[in-house]
Amino acid sequence: MKKLLLLTALFVGFAFTVNAQNTSDFSGLLKTAVTMTNAQVDSTVVAIGGSRSAITFNVQLTKVSGTTAGTIVLMYKTTNRADEAWLTHTTMALTDQAGTKGYDFKLVNNPGVRYKLLLTTSGTSVNTYRPFAVYRK
């Protein structure tokens, strides 16, 4: 009887471990911090395959000096073909701020299989940005 209880406990523990390691969900930093000086362009591309109930991209922009200006554009592709043009989903203007400001792009579904965050700074400023993503199956 003790062996049966031990075997059952091990099986239940293993089942919980497998469910906790669901690789279809993601939450985290997409790449290390990037410092943008004056007028520059940087992009972050991520592939998110399969059906998703929600996707959120967050860009944390930290002002180091100067006056922050420019745009962040969320773009997507509906296929993985190299010749497919990027489609614009949302464009946000950067605003001058002290410290760190977050810019959120919330999608209620995933129209694409590849996404690009395109950050373009203008004027005379130094900013550091970090792009994040969160999605669930």
Image (spheres, helix red, strand yellow):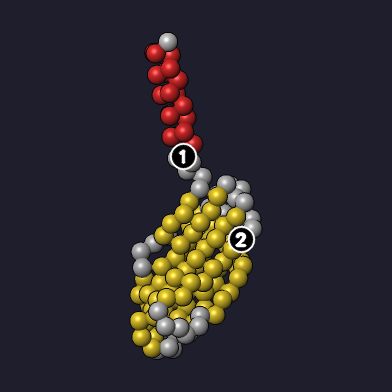
**Could you say whether the residue bearing mark 2 is in a helix, strand or loop?**
strand
Q: Is 32 placed left or right of 70 in the picture?
A: left
Residue at 46% x, 39% y: name it: 20
Q: Which residue, as the protein is rendered here, is positioned at the far top?
A: 1
Residue at 51% x, 80% y: name it: 94
Q: Where does label 1 land, which residue?
A: 20
In the image, 129 versus 81, the foreground residue is 129
Q: Is residue 90 above or below residue 111?
A: below
Q: CA separation, marks 2 and 1?
A: 24 Å
Q: Where does label 2 land, which residue?
A: 107
Q: Quadrant of residue 55?
A: bottom right
Q: Is 8 placed left or right of 64 in the picture?
A: right
Q: Residues within 10 Å of mark 2 (few under 14, many from 20)?
A: some
Residue at 46% x, 33% y: name it: 16
Residue at 47% x, 85% y: name it: 96
| Image position, residue 66 (x, y; %) | 38, 88
Q: Residues within 10 Å of mark 1 (few under 14, many from 20)?
A: few
| Image position, residue 87 (x, y; %) | 61, 66
